[in-house]
Each structure stands twice: as structure tokens, then as C-alpha cells.
Image (cartoon, rainbow, N blue to C red):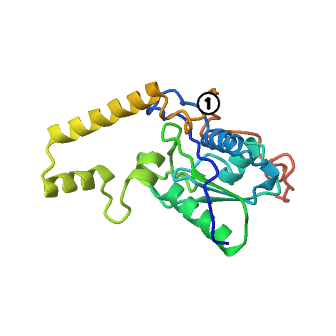
Amino acid sequence: MSDIIIAAAKRTPIGAFLGQFTGFPTPKLGAAAIGAALQQSGIAPADVGEVLMGCVLPANLGQAPARQAALAAGLPPSTGCTTLNKVCGSGMKAIMLGHDLIKAGSASVVVAGGMESMTNAPHMAAVRTGIRYGNGAMVDHMAWDGLTNPYDGKAMGVFAESCADKYHFTREEQDAFAAESVRRAQEAVKSGAFADEIGTAPSPRPVRPAFRMGPPPSCCCPRTMPRRAA
């Protein structure tokens, strides 16, 4: 197969940190984009062979976030689904792999993209073995798994500052660039230039709590454990 095309491309609106999508689970955001893309393309959900979705912050989303998004978008359970993590390049890598699947003849229709919610990324604690002495620290899933270099512990912003110093970008120049980017985005929305790519914003709903306590499994309940003779 030589002709591989992008039949449709849709995304949700971009929300601010702790903004309009607070409490809206990442797979639901992915489902909104997938559903909008399928509607735009005219392709039936049953015709999709594979779903590849990038996701850098999967903690507390539950198993197989890509499958959650696919099922919520109306795709059948028989559709193959894979979640990818290549940090900031996750969504792009998903598209590259989707191309390769079609090129190899392993699929004829692939949904590929990315989904993320920094707002809903949980804080975590390594307490499985208990805290024997002293304070217990919380780890920010977003900061550590998404924005920190694991080899030296430096945040991504440190490398941005190094780049700015190397190429002599002033703070004023960076602020002006950022402001102009926002102005252009707002103008594009007002003029309708983004109308074909932005899907309808999903309605947020409360996200499940990061840590849930429930009754212990029956095999671990003291009332059902066999007693030993004293």
C-alpha cells in the first residue's frame, strides 16, 4: 500500500491547568477526540483495526487508558488498543506507528493520537512497605514522571533556561512570543480557522478519588482466615 492518508483530525479545546477540564478523566478527553474524528471522517467505528493513544501520565487512570478511550468513543471491544509513552512525543509516535501498521498491511484503518490531563495527575506515596520512622513524602506524578529528567533530577524548565542563555533569548522576547501566540490562537478561534479541528468540549464530571478504601478481599478478611491452634 502506497497511499496512506489522514482521513480526519480532531482535538478537544485546550484547557488551562486547574481549569475547565478539572475533574474530567484523561480517557474521556481521548474519547471525545476519537469520537469527533470518526464522525468527521465518516468511518464506521467497527472498521477501525487499531487505536494507538499516547499518554505520559497514566497513574490512577485504571488499566489500558487507550482501550477506555476507544470504548467510550463507541468502538467495539474487538478493536486492538495500545497506550504509548514517549513523553512529549507520545502522540506523534502513535501517528508514526499507525502509519507503519497500515504500511505493513497489519491494519487498514488506525486511530492515532494522544491524551493528557496534568490537572488530574495524582500525588503519590511509596507506602506499600510502611513508613518506619520520620516523615513520608508525596511525589507529584505530573512533575516527576512528566517534567523531570530522571538522570539528573532537573526539571524541564532548567533546560529551557539553558537554551535561552545559549541563544541569548531575553525574558522580554519570550514574553512577547508567548503573548503573540495566544493572540493568534484567539484570533483563529474567533475567525473560525480552527472550526474543523476542534471538537465539541465534553462536559466535565467529578473524577474518582486518587486513593480509594474498600472492604478487603474475602481471602484476607480476618473472619474468613483459618485459625491456628494456640
In the image, what residue occupies the spot 74% across and 44% down?
A: 42
- Left or right, 202 with respect to 156, comes to right
Q: Nearer the viewer, residue 68 or 122?
A: 68
The residue at the point 62 percent across, 44 percent down is 30
Tell me where residue 147 appears, x and y as whole percent: 39, 51
134 relative to 169 in the view: left or right: right
Residue ID at (55%, 39%) = 197
| Residue at 73% over, 39% down | 214
On screen, residue 129 above or below 107: above
Q: Residue furthest bottom?
A: 104
Whether residue 140 is visible to the viewer of this picture, yes or no, is no
Task: Say few, some or many: other residues with alpha carbon within 10 Å of mark 1 (under 14 / 14 to 19 / 20 or more).
Answer: some
Q: In screen coordinates, is 121 left or right of 156?
A: right
Q: Is residue 74 left or right of residue 4?
A: right
Residue situated in front as seen by the camera: 75 or 145? 75
Q: Report the quarter where the C terminus lies.
A: bottom right
Residue 46 placement (x, y as % from top left): 82, 52
Q: Residue furthest front?
A: 3
Q: Position of residue 99 (x, y in %)?
A: 60, 65
- SS under mark 1: loop
> Is the residue 145 above or below the residue 118 in the image?
below
Which one is in front, 28 or 131? 28
Residue 150 visible from this viewpoint: yes
Q: Which residue is tagged 1?
A: 200
Q: Count every numbered label the image shows and give the total.
A: 1
The amino acid on which the numbered mark 1 sits, given as a three-letter code, is Thr
Q: Position of residue 166 (x, y in %)?
A: 15, 58
Q: Is residue 116 above or below residue 193?
A: below
Quick one: quadrant of the N terminus? bottom right
